[in-house]
Amino acid sequence: MQNTMWRESDAGLCLNLSFRDFKEAFQFMTDVAELAEQHQHHPDWRNVYNRVSIKLNTHDAGHQVTEKDRALAKAIVELDSFALAKIDETPQT
């Protein structure tokens, strides 16, 4: 993928983020939820306090990465609330 902040694997496009606090993380997730509805494509994600992990793949395509995933990934990083995030390389447990 051209945007190197997303890691592409067999599982999908993955991104781990950290925010200043839970409120910022939740606002970001709310913004992503609105995008997901607009794109009719929904992430597999997890939130623990100020951290958000996102995985994008297309269930209808056998959980492979498709253009739907790439379009949603691009839209996510263009959100104003994304600017508050730091890339977090520590996997969530």
Image (cartoon, rainbow, N blue to C red):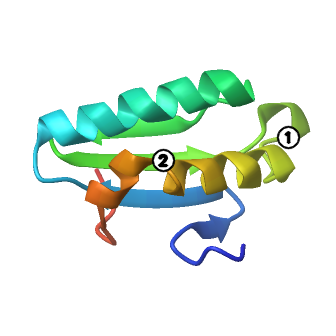
Q: Which residue is mark 2?
A: 54
Decide: marks 1, 2 in contact (CB < 8 A)? no
Q: Earlier in the sequence, mark 1 or mark 2?
A: 2
Q: Amino acid at mark 1?
A: Gly
Q: Position of residue 92 (x, y in %)?
A: 30, 54
Residue at figure coordinates x 17%, y 46% from the top left = 50
Dot 2, how many residues are within 10 Å of its Cα: few (below 14), some (14-19), or many (20+)? some
Q: Secondary structure at mark 2?
A: strand
Q: Amino acid at mark 2?
A: Ile
Residue at figure coordinates x 63%, y 58% from the top left = 13
Q: Secondary structure at mark 1?
A: loop
Q: Which residue is mark 1?
A: 62
Q: Position of residue 44 (x, y in %)?
A: 54, 36
Q: Is residue 7 above or below residue 11?
A: below
Q: Seen in the image, is 36 located left or right of residue 65?
A: left
Q: Name the residue nearer the viewer: 48 or 39.
A: 39
